[in-house]
Amino acid sequence: MSKSVLNINNAGLTNDQAEKIWSGLRTAIIEIQNQNASELRFEELYRNSYTLVLHKHGDLLYNGVRRTVAENLVKISNEVSNTVDGQLLEKIVEAWENHKIVMTMINDVLMYMDKTYCLLKKKEPAYNMGVLLFKDHVIMEGQVANRLKSLLLENIRLERTGRTVDRILLKNVLCMLVEVNVRNTDIYKAVFESDLLSSTAVFYQQESQNFMAQNTVSDYLRKIERRIRQEEDRALEYLDKSTHAKLRHVVQTELISNYAQQLVENKSTGCVHMFHNDMVGDLRRMFVLFSRVPGTLTHIRSCMSSLVKKTGTNIVKDPENLKHPKFFVQKVLNCRKKFHIFVKRSFMEDRSFTRDLKDSLEYFINLDSRAARYLSLYLDDMMRKGLKGKSPDEREKILNDVISIFRYLSDKDVFEDFYKKHLASRLLTDNSGDREDEKMMISKLKAECGHQFTSRLEGMFADIQISSDLMASFKNQRKDQSNVDINVTVLTTGFWPVHNMEHCTLPPEAKKATDEFATFYKTRNSGRRLTWQTQSGTAEVLCHFKHGNKLLAVQTYQMCILMLYNRAETYTYAQIAKLTNIPDKELRRHLLSLAHPRVKVLKKFPNKKSLAPSHTFTYNYGKQSPLFRIKVPLLKVENDSKEIKVPPSVEEERKNRIEVMIVRVMKTRKTLDHNTLMSEVMKQSLRFSVKPIFIKKRIESLIEREYIERDKNKRGLYHYLA
């Protein structure tokens, strides 16, 4: 027997008629709730609901539907409430899914009511009304909500401890809590989310405390890496997307933020331990984890900076390193290389870490003003012998390492001064391993500091080439083919770090050769003047000894001394000084070198280091050596072991450079106050660190020389004088 519904025309509708129509609709809704909808005629149901709304009986229809749905939900609520905890989640999900199906079918019947009546009266559509009723009558009824919360949190706790849970069921329950709010997630937050976040915080507080007390930092980092991955997976699997960021924040706060400083500063297994033991992977893991909470990265950066400064300061203050420039620079390079690897591999070349490493290296390298000189000495050693036998790539790497340290120097002009002296020595003694390496180094310096920095160095190379061509022409046209062979390098004043010294008295044979070259040079370069730098020359002298002839490689001053012994076997110190006219300080070095026990070309009496005018030097005719060619080393000048200041030549160059800057700024601006002028000069690109007092003194000097003047009324105001 089929069920039917009363169908009435739209013409006039009394209350009784409306009640009859509603009664039929109510019966149909109950049948839908009882899952007997297959025999219903939904088109007729739709027309009847349409009729009620059309004839102003929308209130009857809407309120009747609400009561009918609520009555059914009361029954469902009783069933859910009486369900044991072990089956509650499945029961409420089942009830929810059935209720959604019921409300979808009811909604199909009441579509016209939704479009007109509900819109006009600002009431919830039928489906939404049914959802909200489920929330009120089932979820929020009695202790159901609290039981749901407890069961959900317990399942998550069990999963965190390694137990397997039904994730699909949890997802369905949580989706229900989100959906029953219709337009927000208030119930989801109230019933579940807030307690989830607080319970998560408590769980990880306890776990992290226990784990930290019993394990190393590396183990802890691996642990929290797994935990964070698990929580992210859990969030994606069954938590609402609105919870993801909040849960992530709680987990990261409890596992990372609260322990970041403690992890970094742990004395036995923290960052310092990792740096010392090259634990690149663990530091990378820490960096990646801490990057989730950017503020915590400052702890790692601070630790790295402190360690670099401490390591570098120990290098600078180690007396052994200061005695051996090569060791000093090599240890600095090793320190830079070590921490550069950490920055590249562990910290992914993060800009802040790169900057902190640079600042830390600059800090300790510039603690001692000798660093610039030591770097030049290290490079000098490399250029003389250190690059021999190395491949082009290895040579490139060594020079790049030197440049990397050069960048950190605040006093680059001091390095330039020493480098120029060392380069000059290598070029003049032809003691450079490979000229191409020298040119490569200069090109790298040029790339760093510009043409002005290397113009003199390039000029030195040009002089060497020009001198080589000049000497070839001189030897081809030389008339006197005597046994004195001369090789002259003509140095351009201003390029080379040589200083005019009192000209010594050359032996007649050498004097004749130099005069011959001077005549040749003047015929080809009229208007130029030659000044002989005898203190920078070298010579090879054939000496006769009882056991055979030997070829001695000596300095020009030593050659002048040895040539005296063609006339006599013994001279006093005073006689040698008078005959050679060598400056006293240099004469002492060169004489003692010839009389040194390892060389002993001359025999000194008395045999001690001190020198007096009456001390004698006798030619050692009985000297023996298995070598034919003997190089006589020159005694080094004793340097003060204390930290040296800026060389006088560099200091003078700085004065000139600052004054040029001041004049350039004043010429452009005409009038400036003191602070602005100081600021403008400080902003200029300098190759050295400068203190305000230094600039102030140069301003005073320019005022005295009338390049600028003070304002008559305001002492802090300057005017440019054309």
Image (cartoon, rainbow, N blue to C red):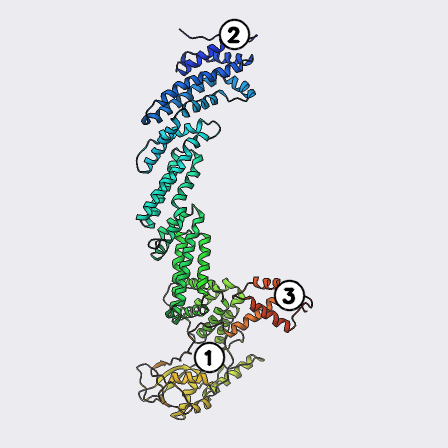
Amino acid type assigned to the residue bearing label 3 in the image: Gly
Q: Is residue 8 above or below residue 521?
A: above
Residue 625: x and y in percent read 31, 83
Q: Which residue is drawn at the image coordinates 40% and 87% (left, top)?
A: 611
Q: Earlier in the sequence, mark 2 or mark 1?
A: 2
CA separation in Å, label 2 and label 1: 130 Å
| Quadrant the N terminus occupies | top left
Q: Residues within 10 Å of mark 1 (few under 14, many from 20)?
A: some
Name the element at disc 3. loop
Which residue does the numbered mark 1 point to in the structure image? 536
Residue closest to the eye, 109 or 23: 23
Which residue does the numbered mark 2 point to in the structure image? 16
Given this view, does label 3 or label 1 mark the residue nearer the observer?
3
| Quadrant the C terminus occupies | bottom right
Which residue does the numbered mark 3 point to in the structure image? 716
Q: Which residue is drawn at the image coordinates 34% and 89% (left, top)?
A: 621
CA separation in Å, label 3 and label 2: 104 Å
Q: Residues within 10 Å of mark 3 (few under 14, many from 20)?
A: few
Name the element at disc 1. helix
